[in-house]
């Protein structure tokens, strides 16, 4: 490394998943502890950084938000190329978004093989009455693709910090 005075190691995380699953909301909850029902389309690709102070080390996470529209899928190879983590989000009330998880991961693996940590997130877990995807089937799919899995709610904040802690704990140290 750069010695004790070096800057924290930086890791790039890209957020993927269908439109409306809550990618921007999860990032906003983590960055600003804020949630809104007002829909805001992501314009192109944008990133934000946050430093995580952990007992053994300090790391800097660079969070890349993306739009889920088909027309942006062509851009994926270029921005996943130098990423450490791909966070694939689906909405637990939307089976079609869950069905897309496999396609997203196949795109990721096609570009990066096993060089990238893949984390599947079932978002909107606060909508218990509208749930259409069970925890166990989601867990099963994540396992099948060699990915970590967690459920979360950007709305309530449930499991959002835990998601980033899980990612940080799984990142290689490399020092
Ligand atoms: P994106 O297209 O994946 O970035 O999705 P957004 O973050 O823009 O969210 C799409 C819609 O779902 C917005 O109206 C959000 O307010 C709503 N939403 C996002 N996360 C949650 C959640 O955890 N629970 C609920 N109930 N709604 C959510
Ligand atoms: Mg968005």
Image (spheres, rainbow, N blue to C red):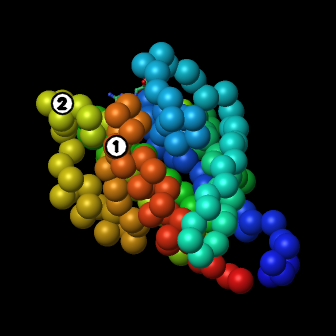
Mark 2 secondary-structure assignment: helix
Q: Residue 41: name its quadrant.
A: top right
Using the rendered image of the protein, determine whether residue 109 is visible from the camera's viewpoint. no
Residue at the disc numbered 1: 158
Q: Residues within 10 Å of mark 1 (few under 14, many from 20)?
A: some
Question: In which quarter of the view is residue 133 placed?
Answer: top left
Most extreme residue toward the front is: 55
Some atom of ligand 1 lies within 8 Å of the CB belonging to the residue at label 2: no
The reply to whether the C-beta atoms of the residues labelled 1 and 2 are less than 8 Å apart is no
Does residue 102 appear to the left or right of 33 in the view shown?
Answer: left
SS at badge 1:
loop
Mark 1 vs 2, N-terminal side: 2
Say whether residue 107 is left or right of residue 111: left
* Residue position for label 2: 130
Q: CA distance from mark 1 to mark 2?
A: 17 Å
Q: Could you say which quadrant of the image residue 166 lies in?
A: bottom left
Identify whether 11 is placed above or below 20.
Answer: below
In percent of width and height, residue 131 lies at 19, 36
């Amino acid at each position: 490394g750069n010695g004790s005075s070096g800057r924290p190691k930086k890791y790039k995380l890209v957020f993927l998943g269908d439109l409306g699953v809550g990618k921007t909301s999860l990032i906003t909850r983590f960055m600003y502890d804020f949630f809104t029902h007002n829909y805001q389309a992501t314009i192109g690709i944008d990133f934000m950084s946050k430093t995580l102070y952990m007992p053994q080390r300090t790391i800097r996470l660079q969070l890349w938000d993306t739009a889920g529209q088909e027309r942006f899928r062509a851009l994926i190879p270029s921005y996943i190329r130098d990423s450490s983590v791909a966070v694939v989000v689906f909405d637990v009330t939307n089976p079609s978004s869950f069905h897309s998880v496999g396609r997203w991961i196949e795109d990721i693996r096609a570009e990066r093989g096993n060089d990238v940590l893949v984390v599947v997130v079932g978002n909107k877990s606060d909508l218990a009455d509208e749930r259409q995807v069970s925890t166990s089937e989601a867990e099963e799919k994540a396992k099948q693709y060699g990915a970590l899995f967690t459920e979360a709610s950007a709305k309530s904040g449930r499991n959002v910090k835990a998601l980033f802690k899980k990612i940080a704990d799984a990142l290689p140290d490399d020092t």
